[in-house]
Image: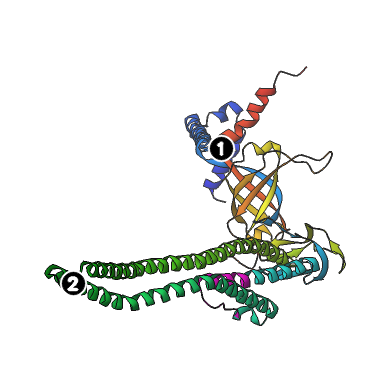
Amino acid sequence: MDAQTGKDIVQSVAREQRPAGQVGGDIDYSKVTRGVRVLLIGVVALVATVIGLSLVIPVEEVARARGEFVPLRRVQVIQASDGGALAAVLVHNDEKVTKGQLIAKFRAENLLRDLARSEVRMAYLAVQTERLDAFAMNRPPVFDAFRAQYPYMVKEATSLSDQQQRELARNLEGKDKQIEAEKSALDAAEREIPAAKTSLDATQELLERMREGVRIGVIPANRLAQAQEQAAQSERIHTQLVASLDQHGARIKQLQAERDAVIARSAADARNQRSELMVQMDELKATQAAYQSRSADIEVRAPVDGAVQKISETPIGTVIPPGGTVCEIVPAGAVLIQARVSPRDIGFVRIDQKAIVKSDAFDYSRYGSIAGKVVRIAPSSAVDGPGQTPYFQVEIELDRPHVGANEQHVVTPGMTGEATILTGEKTIFQYLLKPIYTTLDTAMRER
């Protein structure tokens, strides 16, 4: 050890053995005060920053509710509108069905018998309508569409058509005879007129010669009177024949009009009868449509695509009353969640509010969630049973039917989950002050 090192050791020991008052004199208090000041300023700045951020940074207010996934469209209850004996059930529970697929069959002999009877009645009315239409239009009836299936109807209609034609012919026969008689008389008058005209001309010429003979005195006056009488008789005959032409012509026109009137009345009667039958056909068509609609219900078909549930366990052959349930079909496609919101939160829930839905079947941390929005809020609360907590049912429509991006992770009706409804937002500062508000509101009011 050298001399300098030993000196340093001695001085160090000497300082450690000095009184406390002498040791404190070595501290630089100005440096200590400046450091504390910097530290305090930093703490205050940090606190101010935190408070400032808490005043502006929002946090979401949410209402959480458990619920069940249900179809977007209501469950379809398939009923037998007219009832009947159950003949066959062609589906089973949980089976996927498509729209129009046959589900069950019923036996309804009475309905089928009524439908067949109405079809026969419709064919009869159609045949009779064709018969009357043909008679009114003065054409032969055409029964080809009914001859094969309803030959007896065609035979009867043909017989009635012939009878109508014979009756009309009898009614026209008298008029036709009268018309023929008038035509014959007209022809006879037309044939007699030339001879009468010749006779008239001859008597007129003879009368003129007689007058000349009387004037010169070669013919006695009595002969002139006879000639005048003959001339007048010839003129009367000729005039009557000419007048008879007009009379016979007018009579023929009158008889022809009467004949046409008989035909027109017969056609009008046929058209009136046809109109009555057409009214009956229209009424029967409506009845047939009802029968056919009811007969279609004998074969119960799926109204929508979906899955069968709660199918009737009624034995085959058992009569199901009208309106009886055959099965229920859960429609395929989009789903929504029916969440049960507590009365404490329902006041903040509004239509179209956004929501985040998590399915219990798919882990949220791995598969994610589904976005949605509130589409319906129950107007009143519901209770499952005595002593149970009341709740409000809120329906949330999902933006997509699957969880996350994988379309294979589909949520189906019956699954359960949790909905987080975004009801609003507030700042962190408001959140931190809530306990203080609550304490001040309830403080100093106890007994």
Depth check: 337 or 29 in front?
337
Q: Is residue 158 visible?
A: yes
Residue at image coords 84%, 38%: 387
Q: Mark 1 points at which residue?
A: 426
Query: Which quadrant is home to the C terminus?
Result: top right
Where residue 93 sits, quadrant-wise, is: bottom right
Where residue 189 sits, quadrant-wise, is: bottom left
Point out the residue furthest to the left here.
216
Is residue 430 shown above or below 122?
above
Q: Mark 2 points at which residue?
A: 219
Residue 63 part of the magenta-drawn span? no
Depth check: 129 or 444 in front?
129
Depth check: 160 or 166 in front?
166
Is residue 25 shown above or below 287?
above
Main secondary structure of the magenta stretch: helix
Is residue 246 shown above or below 151?
above
Depth check: 106 or 4 in front?
106
**Residue 111: image location, x then y, percent:** 76, 66
Where residue 6 sits, quadrant-wise, is: top right
SS assignment at label 1:
strand
Query: Of the residues shown, which amino acid type is indicated by label 1?
Result: Lys
Query: Of the residues shown, which amino acid type is indicated by label 2?
Result: Ile
SS assignment at label 2:
loop
**Residue 408: image location, x then y, percent:** 64, 68
Left or right, 195 with respect to 29, comes to left
| Label 1 crowd bin: few (<14), some (14–19), many (20+), radius 10 Å | some
The magenta region covers 126-143
**Residue 185: image location, x then y, percent:** 41, 74
**Residue 369: image location, x then y, percent:** 62, 57
Point out the residue furthest to the bottom here.
148
